[in-house]
Amino acid sequence: MLSRTADHLYWMARLMERAENMARMLDTSHRVSLMPQSGDAAPDSAWRSLLANLGLDEAYAARYGKITSESLLDFMIFSQDNPSSIANCLRGARENAHAVRGTLTSEVWEATNATWLAMREQNPATLLERGPGEFFEWVKYRSHLSRGAALGTMMADEGLRFMRLGTFLERADNTARILDTKFRTLPADTELAAPAPDYYPWSALLHSVSAFETYRKAYRDLISPQRVADLLILRPDMPRSLSRCMKEVYANLQALANRRSVETERRAGELEAELRFARIENLVEGGLPRWLDRFLDRIADLGGRIADDFLVPVSR
């Protein structure tokens, strides 16, 4: 497969996943911002944490200054100046799909193209009128539709593997950022193994990764920070966990391996094995935010290496 074709397929899937993940993070932060804040927490603490985690705090401040729900949702959903806005992600996914339209099935193309056409009809006034929750659910649904069309209609060849590689690398990055944002803001004296005193923010976090019912099924107990971390980091049967994501990344890299990708495959396998055999108690004891920062660095490194080994190495 030509590297340019692989590049378009990889980024089409990755940007669609990024749009979904952005919707999930915004939905969680919006829910938390509406809840009573405990202690000395600022009313906009949830939004500030989100911007800092995404590295967009300076860009937002330069354009809007004061943080408000309306301006932040405009920046994260519609802004053309924010490369990670949902509008930019969906447009990028559509442009990459258009570039390799002949490689895609008609179902995948129609799902991706129709999503962008519908997104162009959205505007801030409509969002406020209907409520952002409905929009976030729509973005998630369209991402599910695109991914399902790919799995249900495309051949299981190199093209689909590059799409899966982009999907799970992006998903791993997102799950790690959600956890990092939450655990970094916990008070220093928080007992991670004990039931969380602030139930609703933790349940909102689980809902953001479609894991609330899964948590109940796996643990059948009150929500505790340590068990949330265990579910979203180490459980290989949880679709959005870091362990599951890295298992998929490693498997697809093995199938796509070439003479240049030996070191990339080794690093992905090393990270996958670390997650497969790790214990959550050890990760927590060593400082979970520190471990998550290192994980994000390793994911970024893998993304750069994949671009060098297989794709067109252009920054996104």
Image (spheres, rainbow, N blue to C red):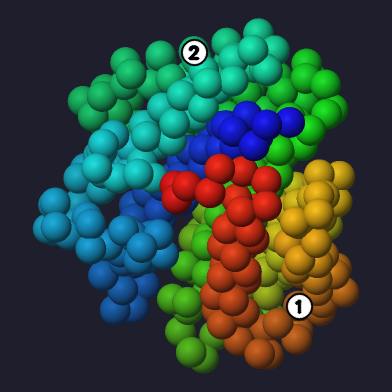
Amino acid beneath label 1: Ile
Amino acid beneath label 2: Ala
Q: Residue at x 26, y 38 (%)?
A: 79
* Residue 140, numbered circle: none
- Residue 220: x and y, percent? 80, 60
- Residue 259: x and y, percent? 81, 54
Looking at the rendered structure, the number of numbered marks drawn on it comes to 2
> Which callout, 2 or 1, points to the residue nearer the camera?
2
- Badge 2: residue crowd in 10 Å (few <14, some 14–19, many ≥20): few
Q: Mark 1 points at which residue?
A: 280
Left or right of 36, for residue 194: right
- Residue 27: x and y, percent? 44, 45
Q: Name the residue under label 2.
A: 114
Q: Within the image, what quadrant is residue 270 found in?
A: bottom right
Q: Which residue is drawn at 56% across and 82% down?
A: 290
Q: Which comes sooner in the sequence, label 2 or label 1?
A: 2
Residue 207 in view of the camera:
no
Q: Distance between the residues labelled 2 and 1?
A: 42 Å
- Residue 43: x and y, percent? 26, 64
Residue 305 in view of the camera:
yes
Q: Is residue 78 above or below residue 245?
A: above
Q: Residue at x 63, y 29 (%)?
A: 5
Observer-nearest residue: 64 or 185?
64
Q: In this view, does 19 lie above or below 93?
A: below
Left or right of 158, for residue 93: left
